[in-house]
């Protein structure tokens, strides 16, 4: 698998995975409702973002390129509107 874009990590403690992708030279961003360590790229309520996307409103998912990016998500963040 070739990742042409970046990795989007949607889950709690996602910064750990983000840092490993970056070590491999793959751009990555993490999304979490909390920023306990001051390193989270996007502090968003993913449930609210999912609802916005399903209602055709602007959301964090609008910046994801389905042809180039990879999404890593664990339940309950697996029903994404992308």
Image: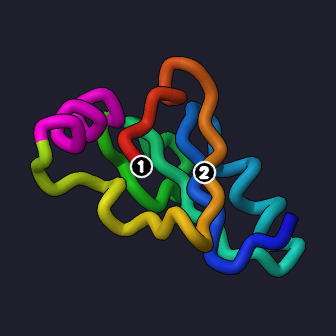
Magenta segment: 46-55
Tell me what residue is drawn at x 60 percent, y 36 percent: 73
Q: CA distance from mark 1 to mark 2?
A: 9 Å
Q: Look at the numbered disc 1 and give the secondary structure of its residue.
A: loop
Magenta segment, principal secondary structure? helix
Q: Residue furthest top?
A: 76
Q: Which of disc 2 and disc 1 is earlier in sequence?
A: 2
Give coordinates of residue 12: x percent, y percent: 57, 32
Secondary structure of residue under mark 2: strand
Q: Is residue 47 left or right of residue 26?
A: left
Residue 74 in the image: state x and y as whole percent: 62, 27
Residue annotated with mark 2: 71
Look at discs 1 and 2 and give the one toward the viewer. 1
Q: Residue at x 82, y 80 (%)?
A: 25
Q: Is residue 79 left or right of residue 2?
A: left
Please determine whether, in this image, residue 6 is positioned above or below residue 25. above
Which mark, by number, is residue 44?
Answer: none
Q: Are marks 1 and 2 in contact (CB under 8 Å)?
A: yes
Q: What residue is rendered at 70% in x and 79% in y?
A: 4
The location of residue 17, given as percent across then percent down, is 75, 50
**Residue 13 versus residue 26: which sits nearer the camera?**
26
Q: Residue furthest front?
A: 67
Residue wearing tag 1: 82
In percent of the image, x 49 and y 41: which residue is there?
Answer: 36
């Amino acid at each position: 698998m070739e990742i042409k874009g970046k990795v989007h990590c949607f889950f709690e403690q996602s910064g750990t995975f983000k840092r490993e992708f970056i070590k491999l030279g793959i751009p990555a961003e993490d999304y979490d409702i909390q920023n306990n360590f001051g390193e989270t790229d996007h502090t968003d309520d993913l449930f609210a973002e999912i609802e916005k996307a399903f209602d055709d409103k602007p959301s964090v998912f609008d910046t994801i390129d389905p042809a180039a990016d990879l999404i890593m998500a664990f339940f309950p963040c697996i029903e994404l509107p992308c």
